[in-house]
Amino acid sequence: MWEMQGELGTSHCYEFGGDYRQSPNYKIGKLGIDYRYNARKKGYEIVRILKGDHWLSENRSPFMNPGMNVSEGWIIKAVNGIPVNKTTPPERLTLNLAGQQVQLSVTSPDGKEEKVVTVPTMKDESKARYRDWVEGNREYVHNASKGKLGYLHLPDMHKDGLIEFHRYFLAEVDYEGLIIDVRDNGGGSVSGLLLQKLARKRIGYDKTRWWDNNPYMDNAPMGPMVCITDEHAGSDGDIFSHSFKLLGLGKLIGKRTWGGVIGIWPRHWLVDGTITTQPEFSFWFKDVGWGVENYGTDPDIEVDIMPQDYVEGKDPQLDVAIKTCLAEIKKNPPLKPNFGKIPRKTLP
C-alpha cells in the first residue's frame, strides 16, 4: 500500500500503523548530562548538566534536583555498583532502566570526596536539551549583538510552536531587531496566527503618566527582522518561510526548505488499524503559484552548516543572521519616540 501511495509523488502521503511486528524497544535511562571518559581518573567526567526548565522535574537533569550536590567536573565511577570503563559508559549500564532510580558512585574533581547518590533517570531528555539549545542561542545573540537583537525559535506550527512563540516573543520584541529561527520546524497549522503578530508595525507611542511609553500597535516588533530556515523546515514551516519573504518582513537566511505544502486530514482507518493519508489541501502563492510543493522556498542568503561546524560548536547560519539584522538596523533604524517639547493642554 505504501508503494501505491508513493506513486502520487506528493508530500504528506503516508501509510502507517496496522498489523506490523513491533521492533524491540530498549529504553535507556537518561541522566541529563554530557560526559567524557577520563583515563587518568578511570571514570566519566560530567562536562555539562542540562538545566532545561529547572522548575519541571521531567524537563531537567536529575542532577539539578535539590540535595544532589554533584556538579560539572565530578567523576562517575560506577552504576549500581558496576564499575564503568572506556568501553562501558554509564548509558550501557542504565539500559532498560528509564524512569527508574539508579545508584551512581561519584567522586569530586579533586578526588577528596566520594559518595553514592540515588538518581531518578529520565525517560527522555530531548526537552531539556532543546531548552538549553534555545537559551544558549538566545544568550549568544544578546551578547554578540551587544544587547541589540532578540531571538526566538519555533519548533513546529502546532501547540509547542505556539507556546514557544508566546513564551519568548514579549521578552524579545522590544530589542532593536529580532531573529526568528524556524530550523527543524515540524509544520502544523498556526503560521498565519504568528505572521499576523510579526507583521504589526510601530507607527506611534502612547506616552503615559506613570508607566513606560507603550508602542502602537501593541507588541509590534521594534525594528528589522530576519528569519533562519533550513531543509528540515517543512509543511507549515515551508509556508511560514515563504510567507515571511512574501510579506516583506525581512531576509530569509539558511537553506532551501523541505518543500511539502499539500496537506492531509488523517481519518481513514483500515480493519487492521492502518491509517492512510491522501493529498487534500494544496497550497498556492501569488508569486510562485504551486511551486513550493516538491521544491521548497529559497533563502535570500544561502548559508550551510558543515559537519566540521557541528563538531566545533559553530552556527554560521545564526552568525550571518546576526550580521544581517545589525546591518538592517543601520539602514532602517527602529522607531523610537522623539516627543520633543510636550504641549501644555490648559485652557486659554
Image: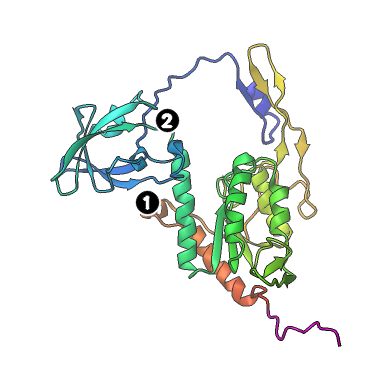
- Any part of residue 86 in sight: no
**Label 2, on which residue?**
123
Q: Residue placed at 45% from the left, 61% from the top?
A: 140
Q: Amino acid at mark 1?
A: Val
Closest to the observer, 267 or 7: 267
Total marks in image: 2
- The residue range painted magenta reads 338-348
Q: Which one is nearer the viewer's eye here, 57 or 94?
A: 57
> How would you rate the neighbour count of disc 2 (Cα within 10 Å): few for under 14, some for 14-19, many for 20 or more?
some
Q: Disc 2 to disc 1, how far (Cα)?
A: 26 Å
Which quarter of the image is occupied by the N terminus?
Answer: top right
The picture places residue 40, in percent across and down from the top left corner, at 14, 45
Secondary structure at badge 1 equals: helix
- Quarter of the image with the C terminus in it: bottom right
Q: Are marks 2 and 1 in contact (CB under 8 Å)?
A: no
Q: Is residue 67 left or right of residue 174?
A: left
Which of pointers 2 and 1 indicates the residue nearer the eye?
2
Is 198 drawn above or below residue 14 in the view shown? below
Q: Earlier in the sequence, mark 2 or mark 1?
A: 2
Secondary structure predominantly adopted by residues drawn in magenta: loop
Locate residue 64, reporting x and y percent.
36, 43
339 in magenta: yes
Q: Which residue is mark 1?
A: 311
- Residue at 59% x, 41% y: name it: 160
